[in-house]
Amino acid sequence: MLLSPLAHFMRCRTAWRRRKHKLYNESYIGEWSCRQIDIAHIVNYLSKGGDNHTREVSQGMKPVSGKSKVMLFSHICHPARMSGAEKWLLFLAKTLAGKYEVVLVVPGSGILSKEAENAGISVAIQDSPLLWSLYESSAAMHQEFANQKASNSYHSLLTLLHMHRPDWVMVNTSVNALPAAVAKKAGIPVVWVINEILYQGTHKMDAVRMINRYADWIIGISEAVLAPFKDSIVNNKKWLISPSWNDAELHPKRWEDNRRSLRAAHHIGDHETLIGLISGMISAHKGIDQFIYMAGMLMPRFPQAKFLIAGSPEITEYFNKCQALANGTLDPSRIIFHPFESHIDHLYPALDLVVVPSMIDEGFGLTALEGMAFAKPVVAYDSAGLGELLKHTGNERFLVPKGDVDGLSHIIADLLQNQDLMLETGTRNRKACTESFGVDIFQNKFNNLLQEVDGVVHNLNK
């Protein structure tokens, strides 16, 4: 049941009197947070006849810094690797920290939380269930979400909002629905970042409507991601804002040293060409087997070519399959398995060419963008947002249909036979990705969104 600000105030005032001199902002009755409420705000509210943005968790005190506060919710925080979604959220958190008080909420300690803390960002740990059925456009999403909203996790999230009192929240990925619902219920503005392409199916538009219900703004990282979010449903809430990078964090001055170091560790000579596939996790949907098939085709013709696969081998059955495939090639020693590398500036400089053979429809293609930022040629499957990225940077010729290993091998063979073309393509990629996805492009779009968010927050805080 929604309480009006006046009813909420009366309920809180009763609690305050009962607790006498105890700190008012520590009281908590059921799922309601009882804070000090500006009576002038209540009067102002009544004089205007009320509004539709009633809060169950009323506005809290402003931070000492005077900045607005935003809470960012990550769906995962892996202890041994970082996904593209985690990297993107960390980039957003660092960007926001220049203007807002930022609190990153993670389900547990991991690389993401440590990187955030190293950047001076506050971290809160709060686990909550994920709604995979929404991402999968399954009919089960409604009942599963109802169960989540009736769970202890819902109340824990509400308590977390009570403790931190953000002015607005940002939730990351479609499966992270519960924080969005709790914040919306509390009347806190919600920015929902969608990184993935929702499954096709008869309930796909139900998933879109659910996201629309709890989001005030919807960020999609590609046109492919935003395709189902029709204007007739989301009412101009959607924003196309793609991932970017901070060039200083790539440490360009270290590239030559890092190149020599990693290549020496794997006994790769200066005359040899290193072709790489970079992934957070070695999994089938990233096309690791496709890459190995490609390597097997290229080995007889190009004895100077070596192949590196970087990623966490946590899916044991699939990793063993990939190792068996590698062992079946002409020279298994030329296929190198490298662990996940959190510092990408230690990895990409060693490569001469990046391959992204994703077998799913990607929302974007962060490893492809990273490869271009490091001035590498990139060859990829035309997988939705991944293909979109290559087309935006003038790399259509380096796209092949998903699953076309022969086509992949053919394009890479052409590059291996023309080292000048490889170098020219890498140099052009660096320039093209900066022009299309560089930090200035990102910041301009993001600032426009933040201007809207700040306007709403300002009106709510009057």
Image (tube, grey):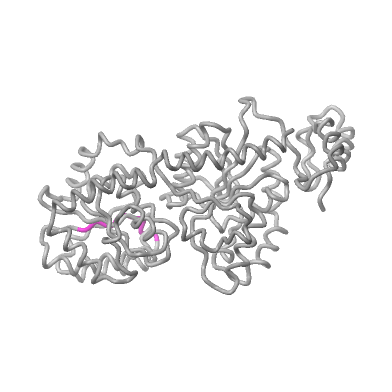
Q: Could you tell me which residue is drawn at 87 percent across and 43 percent down? A: 7
Which sits in the foreground, 206 or 172? 206
Which sits in the foreground, 293 or 96? 96
Find residue 457 and report its horizontal and vertical position in percent. 67, 38
Q: Quadrant of residue 176?
A: bottom right
Find residue 433 and report its horizontal and vertical position in percent. 34, 47
Tell whether 360 sits left or right of 309: right
Image quarter (top left, top right, bottom left or bottom right) of the C terminus: top right
- Furthest residue toward bottom: 202
Find residue 193 and report its horizontal and vertical position in percent. 54, 51
Q: Could you tell me which residue is drawn at 33 percent across and 45 percent down? A: 344
Tell whether 247 sits left or right of 216: left
Q: Could you tell me which residue is drawn at 73 percent across and 46 percent down? A: 186
Residue 33 highlighted magenta (yes or no): no
Tell whether 209 sits left or right of 107: right
Tell whether 236 sits left or right of 406: right
Q: Which residues are magenta?
A: 307-314
Find residue 418 and report its horizontal and vertical position in percent. 13, 56
Count all numbered tags in the image, as a single digit.
0
Q: Main secondary structure of the magenta part?
A: strand
Which sits in the foreground, 379 or 332? 379
Residue 308 highlighted magenta (yes or no): yes
Q: Could you tell me which residue is drawn at 42 percent across and 56 percent down? A: 364
**Taking 126 as reference, is 256 above or below it?**
above
**Taking 422 as reference, is 330 above or below it?**
below
